[in-house]
Amino acid sequence: MISESGAGLRAALCERWGTLASVDTSRMAGMMVIEPPREALTDVARWLLQERGFELGMLVAEREDTVHPALCYIFAGTESSGFLILLSRLDRESRFPSICRVVPAAEVYEREMERRLGIAFETSAPGEPSAHENGAFRMPIGPVYSGVAESGLYELETCGENVLRAEHRLAYKYRAIEELACGRSVDDALLLAERCNGRSAFAHGWAFARAVEAAAGVDVPERAQALRAFIAELERYRSHVATIREICESTGLAVAASQASILEEESLRLCGELTGHRYLFGVVAIGGLTRDFRDTACEKSVDRLYGIHTRLRSLGAALRFEGTFFDRLENVGMISAQGAKAFGLVGPLARASGAHTDLRACQPYEYYQRLTFSVAADSAGDGAARVRVLFRECAESLRLLRRIVTRLPRGPVSTNVPASGAAALGWVEAPRGAALHWVRCDGDGRVAHYQLATPSLRNWYGFPLAMERFSFQDFPITLATLGLSVAEYDR
Amino acid sequence: MSDWVVRGVRTGVKSTPYPKRPETAEGVSPGLPVESTLEDAAAASAVADICPTGALRAQERIVAVDRNSCINCYRCARGPVTLQWDAGYEWAHLTDDAIADAKRRLGRAFGHSLHVRVVDAGDCSACLSEIAQLTGPYYSLHRLGFFITPTPREADALLVVGPVTHGMQAALLATYEAMPSPKCVIAVGACAISGGIFGPSVASEAGACATLPVDVIVPGCPPPPLAVIHALLVAAERTSRECRR
């Protein structure tokens, strides 16, 4: 990957595509904005991806911006180049070129823009119709199906025991968080952001708060930064343990599932005891945190987490030698490195397929700028690799927690954030991967425009990739190893 | 081959003493605010104003709490003026309709075996995660004769989580219709009770109460596993400790 400064990148772009229109960026805080000619959009995107190591973050339709109603393609670059916005003016008549053929990851955003905002894209050639094998039929599962599971419809194309492929039909749980947030005060919208996924509530709340703070140009106090990272790692640990529990349950390994369930409940209680809420609701605030934590309380939490982790390690060791467990995960639900890259998968799911994508390392924010850690990686791309990554990330989170708690800075935990009319991006590596929140505030401290790209929004692309030619009983196992959230997709 | 049996035995008994004795462990409940008397009327109306869901109502110096609407934002616990909070979990109660009409209640006949179907009608996954804890060793729902069943055909109670999104409304109704009578509906969490922070809106209804005849409601965002156990005990009329609203 080539890393370079923003100025160098702009020069390189100008060299290829002529002088680029200058853009008034004062209303988009802290971002490098470039407006290429519309016909060159696809080429610029290709160049950024293939030559400069950028990845598509999200697409934002900035219609509320009266000065520049535009479509923003947000790309995440390397550590030194940061985020880059490709801007394309919105005017009613024209259609936008679809960049799907170059960036397959863009499809989910383009389709959503078409559906929700009525922005037209030049349709790319329809894909090959799927070849039906003799006697194959579509078997629907859901939206209400077995046990305690999130609602979603899965269509399995099968001719009996073997399943050829599976597709997901979601949106049953669509709650319109982005629409509901508009017009509410930033403090009230934060509550919505937290509830986009209860199991990674803190990460989403943090990303939203970061966007509002960036729009106002405010840095939160040091102690708040450290404590935010502390709570986020606690949440990551808890969320990963929950995913491990789900995987154990899916393989029908009752004792292992019970043991993982014990560890999950203990980490939930640990969160509850430290912050007052088992799922960390109401901890993050715009400008910092809603409350301070005593250093001794944080130390005690880490000590207790050590106790939990000792047992998690022992469980992991026992599972490694359990044939009935790993035999069902190895070479099941394969996602290739190419597939993961093309569809822009994020989080542990992508890291198990050889992608080195972790916002904490690629785009370090707040306290992560001072922390060094190793990004867990595995290249096998199957269910077993995903389990290994989860276990490794738990260990890494615990190491980070210990590091943060030994050097907690003193000082206040919140600061005042004035209302601003700017828009900004807040990014946080949530337990499931990159969470990007784009927030435009108005002058009264209300949300004027809000869009969020959750990790699961991307990672559901992994579902059809992993669900190819498998046997029926592997369906719940593969689904569990993917660790996807329906709530995050159906915001 | 691992020694799973030895491993399991060595772990020992983890089950909560509830409902025989109260659970005393820390961090089992997110708490709910309780009616409090403040220093003056100004403080009372100030704290009522910061509530995002209108769960607080100030009358002179007293702040009344509508627990069903509380979404655990902790503004009235960490703001400049604070209310008292209840760290308990026995929050479930019968709805007015269920109290008025004894015939529609399940009654004690289901006291020893109650099968429950869970339907996610748009929850954020926190409520669902708490329900998933119920079958784990700490809460061990089976010891109480409650069972989570995959099919509505053999379910006696329907646990609804989430604000009932438009997409899930038909599926929720179909699940309810598929259950044999007598049946009981339990709305779990602020969203399922009234739509919570989400509804009613362009995408969702005002909770399960607007769609189904709900018998038991359990407030909280999310209600902890112990509160859900309490709700099941209330539904099966196995407890006299029903929460007063």
Image (cartoon, coloured by chain):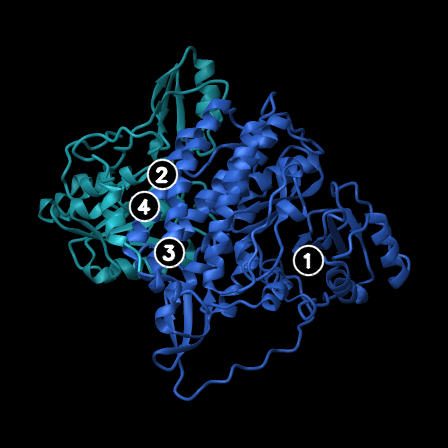
A365 shown above or below A75: above
Quick one: label 1 or label 2, which is nearer the N terminus? 1
Q: Chain of mark 2?
A: A
Give the number of the mark in front: 2 or 3. 3
The residue nearer to you, when weighing A17 against B139, is: B139
Can residue A45 be seen at all in this image of the molecule? yes
Q: Position of residue A104 (x, y in %)?
A: 64, 67
Q: Quadrant of residue A109?
A: bottom right
Colour chain A is painted in: blue
The residue where tag 4 is placed is: B133
Residue beneath the point at 36% across and 73% down: A472
Q: Residues within 10 Å of mark 3 (few under 14, many from 20)?
A: some
Quick one: label 3 or label 1, which is nearer the N terminus? 1
The span from disc 2 to disc 3 (Cα, nearest Å) is 20 Å
The span from disc 3 to disc 4 (Cα, nearest Å) is 21 Å
The span from disc 3 to disc 1 (Cα, nearest Å) is 35 Å
| Callouts 4 and 2 in the same chain | no
Residue beneath the point at 58% across and 81% down: A128
